[in-house]
Amino acid sequence: MHFNTKSIHVGQEPEETTGAVVVPIFQTSTYAQPEVGKHKGHEYTRTSNPTRDAYQACIASLENANDAYAFGSGMAAISTIMTMFKVGDHIVAGDDLYGGTFRVFEQVFRDFGLNYSYVDTTDLDAVANAVNGETKLVWLETPTNPMLKISDIQAISAICQDKGVLLGVDNTFMSPYNQRPLDLGADLVMHSSTKYLGGHSDVVGGVVCTSHPEVSEKLKFAQNAMGAVMGPFDAWLTLRGLKTLGLRMQRHNENAMAVAEYLSNHKAVEEVIYPGLANHDGHEIQKKQGHGFGGMVSVRLAGDLAAAKKFCASTKLFFLAESLGGVESLLEHPAIMTHASVPEDVRAALGITDNFVRLSVGVENIEDLIADLEQALGSVA
Ligand SMILES: *Cc1c(COP(=O)(O)O)cnc(C)c1O
């Protein structure tokens, strides 16, 4: 089965008793059992729920994974992954991670005895050199946020296999339509389903997919034991989002490319960062390892903080908001908004300057998006 067919059919047979073509929201905490010690497949919703099962089956198939586990947020998913490790274990992570991931590593799991090293995962030698005898996992995002740097998943997976450590990829920015890390050798793939999977900015969630039998057993145990599960209604909303994931991503990819090209030719813009542009450092790798370049575009305006603030306040269709991956276009100012907690010198080293703006290009008509950017850039000049 191909991608769009899987997204509409896997886990989504018509409901047994009524024939309802949409998986119902099984909004129940428990299930009546016919006799002591016998049940009909479900006992308690923390352990399993038919709506969550349907969603997990569907997202697993989209990532070409055997299993998927859905959580109440992306951070709950990452935190549950961390509980697979124990005191003294070491994790090599990207140096340009989602801020919440860095925060939970440093301010929560370090206190539980896990150690972390941060490296630029676009540098294969740096990844190989950071792995030591205690290393259990390499964790990366590609593209990174907001610099959109691309790492070579296949090459890093070869390093991980050689050294006997797991590779986990946060695939939130690409979605399985554009990139399937397990096919490239990763052991775990994780999403903040709040973003492209849900796709409509109306539900928070996280998911982990894997085909690694031991990892899957551990995650299944931890999902139930720790209990950070996704609720039935949120699973239903996210499953509904998956049905149009391929359609949306195709449009996100096209619109982002058009926006990147338009901005590249605008005199009020100093630099455009988009993996789909031939001048992007990671362009060739992404062309090889993925099926698209995604909906995120970063720009450096020709101007200072005031210009960036004016631009962000002037768009009408691009809402000024954190988050990304919804049907509606958003923009944000990383230095003051999403990355404010990153120390100023680290921000400077990463290139998150005051004139830097990140766009999440939605699926609106491209003419309207470009007209909106045109008038906002005009108001800056
Ligand atoms: C949003 C995000 C997260 C965190 O997910 P939540 O659903 O907000 O908990 C993790 N990684 C990336 C790349 C994200 O964009």
Image (cartoon, rainbow, N blue to C red):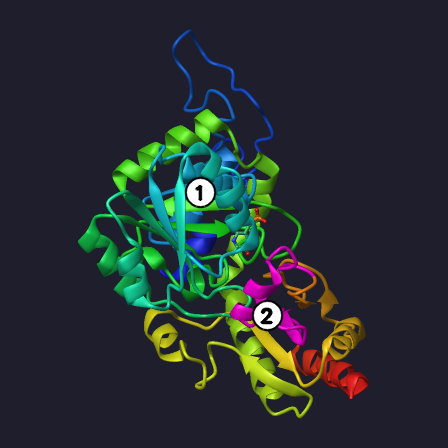
Callout 1: SS: helix
The answer to which image quadrant residue 120 occupies is bottom left
Say whether residue 352 is magenta: yes
Q: Can residue 184 be seen at all in this image of the molecule?
A: no
Disc tally is 2
Q: Amino acid at mark 2?
A: Ile
Disc on res. 56: 1
Query: Is 55 in front, or is 225?
Result: 225
Q: Tell me the quadrant of the picture where the C terminus can be found.
A: bottom right
What residue sits 60% from the left and 59% below the top? 343
Q: Residue furthest left?
A: 162
**Disc 2 to disc 1, how far (Cα)?**
36 Å
Q: Percent from the top left, x then y, of residue 344?
A: 62, 63
Q: Nearer the viewer, residue 340 or 52?
A: 340
Which quadrant of the structure image shows residue 85? top left
Instruction: Tell me which label, 2 or 1, sits earlier in the chain.
Output: 1
Provide residue 247's location: percent of width, then percent of height: 52, 66
Question: Quick one: quadrant of the N terminus?
Answer: bottom left
List the residue tagged with mark 2.
352
Q: Is mark 2 within 8 Å of ligand 1?
A: no
Does 67 sit above or below residue 252? above
Seen from the viewer's position, the closer of residues 35 and 279 is 279
Where's residue 33, x and y in %?
47, 14
- Residue 221 in percent (x, y) is at 38, 28
Secondary structure beneath label 2: loop
Q: Residue at x 32, y 74 (%)?
A: 288
